[in-house]
Image: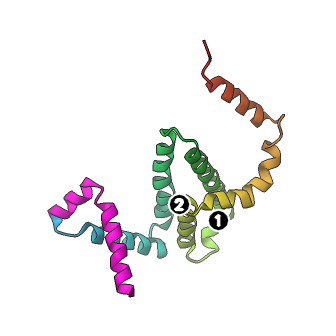
Amino acid sequence: MSFQDRTQHQIGQIDKELSKYPMLNNFEKQTSVPKVYAFLGLVGIYFFLVFFNIAGEFLVNFAGFLVPGYYSLEALFSASTVDDTQWLTYWVVYAFLSVFESAVNAVYWFPFYYTFKFVLVLWMALPQTGGAQIVFRSFIQPVFSRFFSQSGSTAANLRSQADQATKPHAM
């Protein structure tokens, strides 16, 4: 399979995914511009702006909040708690990254900082990669686990009280 064939296949897959949204189908009908090309054009402009740091901080933070925020709300309204844990872990790691970033003022130290931050945020946010869980288990958990894992700790007591309060009472 040639590069062109693989590219056309991927474009077809993206188009199939985008076809699920009536707004994009209407856009395509009204403008005669294929929705997949409009989408890829916007993605290209987005990456161009991030790469050359034209509103890079805003765009990366926007990506770091918008998609994970949507999926976090979706997780809160679902019955499963697996996705709750995934998104809670993401937000804890994202908060630590934000605090670290502001303390170090990393943007002035590293060229193309926002490009790297965007890739990191994307890696952390995508459930397929499990990036937030990897960062949490590698860096945050080893440092803070001693404060939260003891059975007599305040956090453990608060969690057990909250669990007791939310359990349905038998009548």
Horizontal and vertical percent for residue 12? 31, 71
Horizontal and vertical percent for residue 77? 47, 38
Horizontal and vertical percent for residue 107? 60, 69
Q: Which residue is mark 1?
A: 105
| In this picture, residue 139 sits left or right of residue 166 | right
Screen quadrant of the N terminus: bottom left
Amino acid tagged 2: Leu
Question: Which picture quadrant has residue 166?
Answer: top right
Question: Which picture quadrant has residue 14?
Answer: bottom left
Q: Secondary structure at mark 1?
A: loop
Query: Residue drawn at (28%, 60%), measured in percent from left and top?
Result: 19
Q: Give the Cα distance between marks 2 and 1.
A: 26 Å
Q: Nearer the viewer, residue 132 or 78?
A: 78
Q: Nearer the viewer, residue 136 or 14?
A: 14
Amino acid tagged 1: Asn
Horizontal and vertical percent for residue 138? 73, 61
In the displayed orientation, state which residue is furthest to the top. Answer: 171
| In this picture, residue 125 sits left or right of residue 137 | left
Query: Residue drawn at (23%, 69%), measured in percent from left and top?
Result: 34
Query: Residue drawn at (68%, 25%), measured in percent from left and top?
Result: 164
Q: Earlier in the sequence, mark 2 or mark 1?
A: 1
- Numbered badge on residue 6: none
- 59 versus 90 height, above or below: below
User: Which label sits in the foreground, 2 or 1?
Assistant: 2
Q: Which residue is mark 2?
A: 126
Magenta stretch, overall SS: helix
In this picture, which residue range is highlighted in magenta? 1-30
| Label 1 crowd (10 A; few <14 / some 14-19 / many >=20) | few
In the displayed orientation, state which residue is furthest to the bottom. Answer: 2
